[in-house]
Image: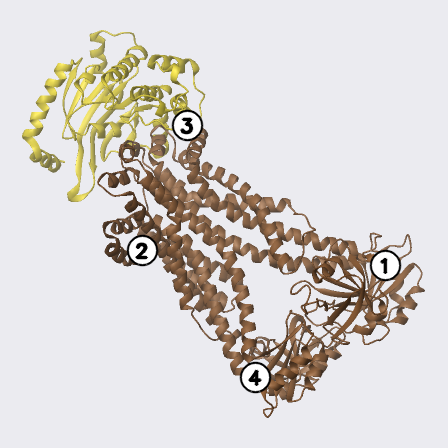
Chain colours: A yellow, B brown
């Protein structure tokens, strides 16, 4: 939509709230279970993910980062609040519209790759399109597989590919339908560092070259350093954010959050629950 | 999407093969039933159409001899032949004598042919058929003259007779009960006799031996001049016929025979299809189970498809498409196997005397359509529930490690199942007590009870599994405990697997309780109603010559001889099976309870009515009943109403004279013999036996032997039904194998863990085996319980029909449960080996 923008332009974009957000949550709340055993996973979270930006969601285990992603990616339903992808409010949509949204607007990369074991790499990449019953755009397909560098392995089945290769196939699959936003859930969690670099570099390029919006959950500061912006979650709340982070900045921030979490401990959890 | 489905199908070949096998067996039964009955039809068609003449003259309403339901005794005079020869348009006239019930005795004194296939005698005639061929031909030797006979080739072979031999022949009616003739040739009739026996004599010998030497015929065959049609021939002949004689064209005769045949075949087909239905119902459980497990195992993949934007419909459709493919392949194999089954049935029928070896298999388009429709519908129906559950998977499940399928509450299921069982029981009881449509109510009711119990079985099975758990733990320690817990872990799956076995065993147990009760009732009634010392009864299901009774009467020490006959008759406008006897003599040989009147009131002008028929028809003593037999119709007065009895096994009983005047050839079905108490029993018996010597068509029995013979008949039917239900049980066993194999795959990780903590292969195998036994015994216990209930209900409902004693074959039922346990052990062989073979490391590392 725009060429490489200046900082001023970026600020301007930020100012026009919502209009340029590829996805946003407003007072999002997610509770698992009922009654005394209920667990509050997300508590009044409001966040925006700007279009054409690479955002990382970070936080200690149990901070609600994965839940946030699932709710925003139309994989799970919110208990209260609103979730927008583009201009559509997910909390008001029925299964049919959600299905369409997942199919056309959202791409997803899983930690465990989640490729269909019986299909080849190429078939896996084209799966979302075949589900939608659409012809693949050959040019875009070529662009994507060249970007992920998987051209020579297209005929292989997932069990013949390394973890890094599988994840690159999964990334290509997420991009094939040209979604307005790609969510990646710990995409490098199972990978060695070389593969990790491949995958993250690839996600970065899609943002830079194709203006793709990418949101990634991670707890690896090195991975977070590839992004434009990092938001931090703690105990189901949004607590902080960093722009143009370095690995060191992120690590520092994580340490700080870790201390806060230790200090608050159980009491903090209870307070959070009571507040809602 | 289709590709994903196809790939998944190929990836799970073994699992699907097992569920596909259920379809194969069920469809094979359906296809086999149709192929076999079509084959029967084709065989009979070829006989009928190749052998009828242009026109046939018979006494009006002639009852074709079928050797069982009372043969027509009326004949046509030789003078009629002369008169017909003078009619214009008639090319030739042949007077024929045709008799059903002339048997060849082989060199060992046994009957040739035996039960089932008819044994016929006819005079030689070269009358052409409508197609211009000569149906009856002498293929070897000469045309028989007086005192000579030609046998069909197969009978001659079976008996070991050759041209020149003296052939002993036993007849069922008229003339001497036994005579001999010299074999001079071999005969052939049409293309094949289908295993029937044919004896060909000259006309005089036929008249001599079967018509008391009168120069008369049973039927006259007409052949038309060239250019004269069948109907022209009929119209030309009709005016010269006496009032009680009629003529029918060849086409008309063909049509009538084929109609009768179609009716009989419909019955055979329906009988076989009932078992096909049982097999399919059991198969449905297996298919539901397989698809449920497949969906459970693929749930992560299916959730992933949802996460990638597949709609609910797409997910459920992918499961259904998979089912459809399995159904098409299974049905195809089923149809092929159906041919095999038809061949098997042909062999079985060959054993009882119906030789169909000359007839090729008949595959009508209808067979293919029905077989595929049934296979596909049943499979899709069975896959529908798992498919629906698959579509309810939340997309987020793709991200979880432990994916569990959403399940409806068991409570709703139990309530639905319980309601179904109760309603089904109601329908069953209503149907059995005669509410119309009785058969439909019984069938649907029984099915509803079975499915209802199957639905509730996750709950019903709990106490059984618990009861098994106690000895298991004591005997096998932790391994025993784990195996019952495994069985109880997924109650629906265990229940569905057990239910398949339950259905088969429920039907088997019901039949065994019913047959046990029937046998006990036979013993009781024979003991209570038989005053006679001996019964002379037919050994081959065909009545015998009245001369036998005449001669038994002459045996010293025989006090009373009571004859008992059967026939078909038209009573007040409906076709009935009636009995005939001499009232006063039967009264001495049997105890029959009368509501009003007595056996002594039976005369030429009266009829006795069964109490049930009397109340159905509103008849009481003094009322008039119209009985029409081939030769005449008369009004008879009801002189007595008797309670159902094995001695009087018909709704209406008339006198012997009524039957004879009605044109039914005298032939006895049973002869009851009472001895003079002053003569020693073995002396009388020896005397009667000397009369019966050389007559293998009849046998002499005392009370105990007679009861045993009746019981044998019940048991034979029971064994046939057992054999057919065996198929359903095979499918159920496959179900257990399938479920266990799938659970082993599903629990790969857990099994690896058990091995890692030191469980030996042996222990592991035992664990799987014990789980299998638990499932099998659960199914058996539920099945036997339902079977017991069904059996009791059936016995109660038929108490009025003579099955008034309830006898539960406890030993047999216990044996069923023990056999089920053994089946459980066998079913576990393959899955247990598979579990034991799992590589520990690989199992734990399994993603």
| x then y, percent, for residue B279 | 49, 52
User: Are discs 3 and 1 both within one chain?
Assistant: no
- Residue B331 shows in the view: yes
Residue located at (6% from left, 31% from top)? A264
Regarding mark 3 in the picture, which secondary structure is present there? helix
- Identify the subunit bearing mark 1: B
Q: Nearer the viewer, residue A193 or B89?
A: A193
Q: Quadrant of the N terminus of chain B?
A: top left
Give the labeled residue for mark 3.
Answer: A131
- Identify the subunit bearing mark 2: B
Of badges 4 and 1, the one in the foreground is 1
Give the labeled residue for mark 1.
Answer: B127
Give the labeled residue for mark 2.
Answer: B459
Q: Is residue B9 above or below residue A123?
A: below
Q: Is residue B687 above or below residue B712?
A: below
Q: Nearer the viewer, residue B447 or B543?
A: B543
Q: Which mark is residue B592?
A: 4
Residues under numbered marks 3 and 1 in contact, where contact means CB atoms less than 8 Å apart: no
Regarding mark 2 in the picture, which secondary structure is present there? helix
Of badges 1 and 2, the one in the foreground is 1
User: Are discs 4 and 2 both within one chain?
Assistant: yes
How many other residues sit within 10 Å of disc 2, few (<14), some (14-19) or many (≥20)? Answer: some
Q: What is the spatial separation of the Cα atoms under label 2 and label 3, in whole angstroms?
A: 40 Å
Q: What is the spatial separation of the Cα atoms under label 4 and label 1, in whole angstroms?
A: 51 Å
User: Are discs 1 and 2 both within one chain?
Assistant: yes
Looking at this rendering, what residue extends furthest in the bottom direction?
Answer: B678
How many other residues sit within 10 Å of disc 1, few (<14), some (14-19) or many (≥20)? Answer: many
Q: Is residue A223 above or below residue B27?
A: above
């Amino acid at each position: 939509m725009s060429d490489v923008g200046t900082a001023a332009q970026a600020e301007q974009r930020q100012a026009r709230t919502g209009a340029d957000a590829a996805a946003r949550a407003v007072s999002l709340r997610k509770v698992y279970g009922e009654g005394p055993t209920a667990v509050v996973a997300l508590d009044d979270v409001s966040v925006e993910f700007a279009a054409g930006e690479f955002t990382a969601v970070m936080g200690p285990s149990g901070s609600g980062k994965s839940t946030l992603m699932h709710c925003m990616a139309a994989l799970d339903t919110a208990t209260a609040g609103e979730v927008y992808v583009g201009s559509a409010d997910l909390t008001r949509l029925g299964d049919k519209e959600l299905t369409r949204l997942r199919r056309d607007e959202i791409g997803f990369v899983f930690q465990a790759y989640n490729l269909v074991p019986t299909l080849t790499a190429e078939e896996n990449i084209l799966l979302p399109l075949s589900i939608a019953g659409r012809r693949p755009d050959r040019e875009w397909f070529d662009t994507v597989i060249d970007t992920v560098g998987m051209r020579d392995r297209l005929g292989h089945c997932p069990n013949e590919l390394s973890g890094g290769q599988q994840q690159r196939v999964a990334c290509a699959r997420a991009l094939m339908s040209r979604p307005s936003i790609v969510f990646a859930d710990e995409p490098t969690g199972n990978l060695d560092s070389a593969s990790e670099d491949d995958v993250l570099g690839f996600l970065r390029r899609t943002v830079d070259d194709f203006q793709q919006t990418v949101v990634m959950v991670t707890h690896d500061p090195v991975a977070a350093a590839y992004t434009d912006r990092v938001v931090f979650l703690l105990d189901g709340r949004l607590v902080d954010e960093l722009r143009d982070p370095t690995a060191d900045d992120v690590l520092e921030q994580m340490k700080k959050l870790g201390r806060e979490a230790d200090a608050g401990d159980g009491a903090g959890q209870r307070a959070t629950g009571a507040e809602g | 999407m289709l590709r994903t489905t196809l790939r998944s199908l190929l990836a799970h070949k073994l699992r699907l093969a097992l569920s596909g096998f259920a379809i194969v067996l069920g469809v094979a039964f359906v296809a086999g039933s149709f192929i076999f009955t079509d084959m029967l039809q084709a065989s009979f068609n070829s006989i009928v159409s190749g052998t009828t003449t242009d026109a046939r003259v018979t006494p009006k309403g002639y009852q074709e001899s079928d050797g069982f339901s009372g043969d027509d005794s009326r004949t046509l005079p030789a003078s009629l032949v002369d008169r017909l020869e003078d009619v214009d348009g008639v090319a030739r006239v042949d007077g024929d004598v045709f008799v059903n019930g002339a048997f060849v005795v082989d060199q060992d004194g046994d009957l040739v042919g035996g039960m089932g296939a008819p044994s016929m005698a006819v005079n030689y005639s070269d009358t052409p058929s409508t197609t211009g061929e000569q149906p009856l031909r002498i293929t070897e030797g000469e045309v028989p003259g007086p005192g000579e006979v030609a046998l069909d080739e197969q009978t001659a072979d079976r008996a070991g007779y050759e041209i020149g031999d003296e052939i002993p022949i036993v007849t069922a009616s008229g003339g001497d009960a036994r005579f001999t003739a010299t074999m001079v040739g071999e005969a052939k009739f049409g293309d094949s006799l289908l295993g029937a026996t044919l004896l060909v004599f000259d006309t005089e010998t036929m008249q001599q031996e079967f018509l008391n030497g009168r120069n008369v015929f049973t039927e006259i065959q007409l052949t038309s001049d060239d250019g004269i049609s069948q109907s022209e021939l009929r119209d030309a002949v009709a005016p010269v016929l006496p009032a009680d004689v009629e003529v029918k064209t060849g086409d008309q005769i063909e049509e009538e025979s084929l109609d009768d045949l179609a009716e009989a075949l419909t019955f055979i087909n329906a009988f076989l299809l009932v078992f096909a239905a049982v097999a399919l119902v059991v198969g449905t459980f297996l298919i539901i189970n397989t698809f449920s497990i497949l969906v459970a195992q693929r749930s992560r993949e299916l959730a992933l498809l949802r996460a990638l934007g597949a709609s609910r419909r797409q997910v459920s459709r992918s499961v259904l498409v998979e089912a459809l493919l399995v159904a098409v392949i299974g049905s195809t194999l089923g149809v092929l196997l159906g041919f095999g089954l038809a061949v098997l049935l042909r062999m079985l029928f060959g054993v009882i005397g119906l030789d169909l070896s000359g007839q090729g298999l008949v595959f009508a388009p209808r067979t293919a359509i029905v077989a595929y429709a049934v296979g596909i519908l049943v499979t899709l129906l069975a896959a529908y529930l798992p498919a629906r559950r698959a579509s309810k998977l939340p997309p987020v499940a793709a991200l979880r490690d432990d994916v569990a399928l959403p399940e409806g509450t068991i409570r709703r299921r139990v309530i639905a199942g319980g309601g179904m069982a109760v309603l089904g029981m109601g329908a069953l009881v209503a149907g059995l007590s005669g509410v119309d449509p009785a058969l439909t109510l019984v069938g649907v009711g029984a099915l509803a009870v079975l499915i209802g119990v199957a639905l509730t079985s996750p709950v019903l099975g709990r106490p059984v599994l618990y009861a098994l758990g106690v000895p298991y733990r004591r005997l096998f320690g932790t391994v025993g405990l784990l195996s019952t817990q495994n069985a109880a872990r997924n109650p629906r799956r265990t229940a569905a697997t057990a239910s398949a076995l339950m259905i088969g065993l429920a039907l088997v147990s019901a039949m065994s309780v019913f047959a046990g009760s029937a046998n006990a009732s036979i013993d009781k009634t024979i003991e209570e109603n038989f005053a006679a010392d001996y019964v002379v009864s037919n050994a081959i299901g065909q009545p015998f010559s009245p001369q036998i009774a005449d001669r038994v009467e002459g045996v010293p020490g025989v006090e009373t001889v009571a004859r008992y006959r059967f026939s078909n008759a038209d009573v007040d406008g409906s076709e009935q099976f009636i009995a005939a006897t001499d009232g006063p003599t039967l009264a001495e040989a049997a105890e029959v309870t009368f509501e009003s009147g007595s056996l002594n009131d039976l005369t030429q002008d009266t009829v006795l009515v069964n109490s049930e028929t009397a109340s159905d028809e509103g008849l009481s003593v003094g009322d008039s009943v119209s009985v029409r037999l081939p030769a005449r119709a008369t009004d008879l007065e009801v002189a007595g109403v008797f309670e159902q009895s094995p001695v009087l096994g018909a709704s209406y009983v008339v006198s012997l004279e009524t039957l004879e005047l009605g044109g039914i050839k005298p032939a006895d079905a049973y002869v009851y013999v009472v001895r003079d108490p002053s003569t020693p029993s073995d002396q009388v018996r020896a005397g009667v036996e000397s009369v019966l010597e050389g007559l293998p068509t009849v046998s002499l029995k005392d009370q105990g032997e007679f009861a045993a013979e009746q019981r044998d008949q019940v048991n034979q039917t029971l064994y046939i039904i057992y054999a057919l239900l065996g198929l359903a049980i095979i499918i159920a066993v496959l179900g257990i194998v399938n479920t266990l194999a799938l659970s082993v795959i599903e629990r790969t990780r857990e099994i690896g863990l058990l091995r890692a903590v030191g469980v030996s292969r042996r222990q592991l195998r035992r664990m799987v085996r014990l789980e299998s036994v638990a499932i099998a015994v659960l199914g058996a216990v539920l099945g036997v319980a339902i079977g017991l209930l069904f059996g009791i209900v059936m016995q109660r409902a038929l108490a009025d029909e003579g099955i008034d004693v309830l006898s539960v074959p406890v030993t047999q039922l216990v044996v069923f449960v023990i056999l089920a346990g053994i089946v459980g052990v066998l079913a576990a062989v393959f899955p247990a080996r598979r579990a034991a073979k799992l590589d520990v490391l690989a199992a734990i590392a399994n993603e």
